[in-house]
Amino acid sequence: MLSEKNKNHKNRYPTGFISFHQAMIDRIRPLITYIIDNDFPTLGICFGHQMLGYFFGAQVLDDPEQAEFGSFPVSLSGDGRRDPLFRDVPDDFISFLMYRDSVVSLPEKCVLLAHSSRCGIGSFRYKNNIYGVQFHPELEKDEVCFRVTLHPEYAGESLETFLETLQPSDHASKILANFLRKSLC
């Protein structure tokens, strides 16, 4: 369970999960249950979004047909436009998406906040403080370039073309600041 220090919402920082397997799901179940039961401020990024969706009962699928890797437009829903997480973020913005698994149905009692052309559930909120985002607001273009040079198989046919087509994500980092502002104030 959480230490006394970490039970204080003011000490929580956003993180993402890295890999997915049943043993890990079983190990983090108490943590996710605590987060859900206490509306603990959480920003699940990419796999964290998928994990939250899974725990909320949504279907999460590995679907290469809808996979996205690169910079893509993300669009806010009406609820997303009004949500403090997306304050000062345009209705349509560029962010980095790097996934094959995705949440394919909106979890019950969750509010749809954003989507991309291939990902219908790009962001959701549960209660007031629990968020999932499929995209990567924590990454900048240079970090994506670095990652793809380590794993050029994700670049498709041409690493050079992939790197040339990456667009900067000028607004996504505001999401992190908004999450911290909302969670720490």
Image (cartoon, grey):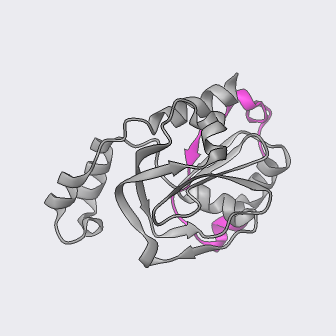
Q: Say which residue appears at 71% left-offset and 27% top-offset.
A: 10
Q: Quadrant of residue 87?
A: top right
Q: Say which residue appears at 48% left-offset and 37% top-offset.
A: 90
Give residue 13's position: percent from left, percent from top. 61, 35
Would residue 9 be counted in the magenta stretch?
yes
Q: How many marks?
A: 0
Of residues 79 and 165, the one nearer the viewer is: 79
Q: Residue furthest top?
A: 185
The answer to whether residue 1 is seen in the rendering is yes
Residue stretch in magenta: 1-26
Would residue 66 be counted in the magenta stretch?
no
Give residue 20's position: percent from left, percent from top. 56, 67
Q: Residue furthest right?
A: 37
Q: Say which residue appears at 46% left-offset and 35% top-offset.
A: 173
Give residue 50's position: percent from left, percent from top. 60, 62
Q: Is residue 170 above or below residue 67?
A: above
Give residue 114's position: percent from left, percent from top. 57, 51
Q: Is residue 3 left or right of residue 14?
A: right
Q: Is residue 28 above or below residue 157?
A: above
Quarter of the image with the C terminus in it: top right
Q: Is residue 108 left or right of residue 81?
A: right
The answer to whether residue 13 is seen in the rendering is no
Q: Quadrant of residue 6?
A: top right
Of residues 45 and 19, the one nearer the viewer is: 45
Q: Say which residue appears at 45% left-offset and 72% top-offset.
A: 66
Q: Is residue 15 above or below residue 11?
A: below
Of residues 108 and 40, the one nearer the viewer is: 108
